[in-house]
Structures are given as C-alpha cells and as structure tokens.
Amino acid sequence: MGTAARHLSTPEIDLFIDELWVQDGLAKNTLDSYRLDLEFFAGWLDAQGIGLLEADSQALALFFAEISKRNKATSQRRCLSTLRRFYRMQLAQGMIEEDPTVQIDAPTVPGRFPKTLTEKQIEDLLDAPDCGTVFGLRDRAMFELLYATGLRVSELVDLQFSQTDLNAGLVKIVGKGNKERIVPVGEWALEWIQKYLADGRPTLQKTPNHYIFLTRFGEPMSRQMFWNIVKQHAVQCGIDSQRISPHVLRHAFATHLLNHGADLRVVQLLLGHVDISTTQIYTHVAQERLKKLYEKHHPRA
C-alpha cells in the first residue's frame, strides 16, 4: 500500500492474525500481507481520530478514495478483501454491530493475462546455466524442476528429500493453507536433479541438512536469491529482464500445458489452486488453441 499513513498495530489486529493462523494455517507471507493492510488502514484511521472498530462505511469510502490516487486497483482490491475478512470476523464475535465494508464496491481491475515465455525462450533459459560448474548444475536442476512442475518459488527453495520420490517421479508439496498435492516430475527434470544430487550437492553441503537446493554456504536458498539467479541467466540468453521472474516459469508451465491439450482442471490441481477461478486466467490460452484447431480442421473455417 501507499505511504501516506503510518502503520499502527492494535490488539484487534494481533488477535485477528492469530485467528487466521489457527483457522486456516496460512503461510507467514500471507499473514504478513493481511497485517500490513490492516496496520496501514488503522494508521490512516488514527490520523482521523477514529478507532479500528469505530470505522463506518463513510470512513472506508474516504480511505479508498484517497488511496485510489496512488495505488493500483489490484492493491485496493486486496486491501478491501483483507478489511472485509477482518470486519466479518469482528461482527461474528460481537465486537461490532455492522460490517462497514458491505457498501464498499471493489475497484474494477482491467483484464490482464499473466506474463509468460515462449517454448523457445524456455529452452534458451534452461540451456543458459554452465553445467560444468556445481552452481550451473544446481541452477539447471532448479529451472528444469520449476518448469516441469509449476511449483511456487517458496515450494521450490523449501523442497526437502522427504517430499520427493525420484524413483516414482513425484514430489509432495504442502502449499497455501497447508493443502497437500502430489505433482509428477518429467524425465528430463528427473535426470538433471539426479545429476545435481550426484555431482553438485555433495560439494555444496557443509553440514547435514534435508534441503535439496543449497547455496555456496551449504544453506537452503532464499526466494530472493533464486529470483536473482533467474534474472542473471535470463539476461545471458537475451530475455527481457522486465519480463522474467520465477513466477513467470510457473505461468509458462500452465500455459504450455494448455497449449498441448491439457484440461484446465488438471492444471488447477497441478498448480495447487483451491478455486478453479484462479486458474481461469489461463482460459485465453485454451480459447486460442481451440480457435486454431477450428481454423485448421473445419471445412468452412
């Protein structure tokens, strides 16, 4: 969110975050996002002389009118979603008599498609690491696994041996909300992982640990470090650094699956999306594929 208001922590926010953690088992990053939105709003209210549990729909309308001048619609929608969940919980617990978010409409977000890469660009990126080094071998194995499975970056860097069955070609992932899913791993990715485990990881490991992908210090890798690795190799193979991130590889995984005939619900399961609507950002891909098939095969297309 913006920086016009100071961030203000309150007991109500602390209790709400604790309740979310107990009820839904949300990841720390998700809980942090909820907290930041609430503390930002609480700070804005405090500057108006209003308490968090005293806010009415008029106060919320003024708040969103102000932040709309400098925040994207997506940020505003996320903040409103946070506030709705917070006030609904307060209402259910008898802390307030009315939900002030009921009359607030979410801002419209322009239709947008996820950034992705062509299959040729993916091939170039996979080939970019110098596999004659332990770091290149590690990077290649990580790229191959990410593209083969569509894992979230946090799921990739946190991957441990107990989650993998390389003989069966499967990884077990515990994603958002502690939802577990089993994801198959393709032969090429398995081959590179096995090369890395045989010739790369033993050199990187300093002390015993269960993480698969390690840094030069023998520690599990951070998301930021992997993001920098992706950027570095993307630049080497001529991919615009503004179009690349680890999440783009996840989008490429989904997009290329649909291009080659996968069902949208299969992609949903592989990505770990609880709701099919989240996966429907990829429906434009399926529609384009159907259009091409129609034009190719229909006698009057």
Image: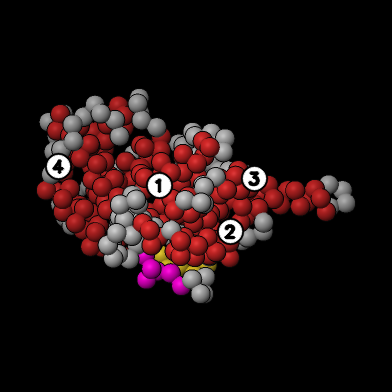
- Does residue 228 appear to the left or right of 145 in the view shown? left
Please state which of residues 114 and 9 is positioned toward the viewer in this rendering.
114
What residue lies at 36% left-to-right and 65% top-to-bottom? 160
**Sequence-wise first label, 1 or 2:** 1
Q: Alpha-carbon distance for marks 4 and 1? A: 32 Å
Q: Which mark is residue 264?
A: 2
- In the orientation shown, which residue stands out farthest toward the top? 69
Q: Nearer the viewer, mark 3 or mark 4?
A: 3
Residue that carries the numbered disc 3 in the rendered image: 120
Q: Alpha-carbon distance for marks 3 and 2? A: 23 Å
Q: Amino acid at mark 3?
A: Lys
- SS for dot 3: helix
- SS for dot 1: helix
* Quarter of the image where one finds residue 75: top left
Q: Amino acid at mark 1?
A: Phe
- Whether residues under marks 3 and 1 lie with C-beta atoms below 8 angstroms apart, the answer is no
Q: Quadrant of the N terminus?
A: top left
**Sequence-wise first label, 3 or 1:** 3
Q: Position of residue 89 (x, y in %)?
A: 23, 54
Q: Alpha-carbon distance for marks 1 and 2? A: 28 Å
Q: Nearer the viewer, mark 4 or mark 1?
A: 1
Please state which of residues 61 and 243 is positioned toward the viewer in this rendering.
243
Magenta highlight range: 159-165
Please state which of residues 29 and 18 is positioned toward the viewer in this rendering.
29
Q: Which mark is residue 226?
A: 1
- In the orientation shown, which residue stands out farthest toward the right? 299
**Sequence-wise first label, 4 or 2:** 4
What residue lies at 61% left-to-right and 52% top-to-bottom? 256
Query: Dot 2 surroundings within 10 Å: few (below 14), some, or many (20 or more)?
Result: some
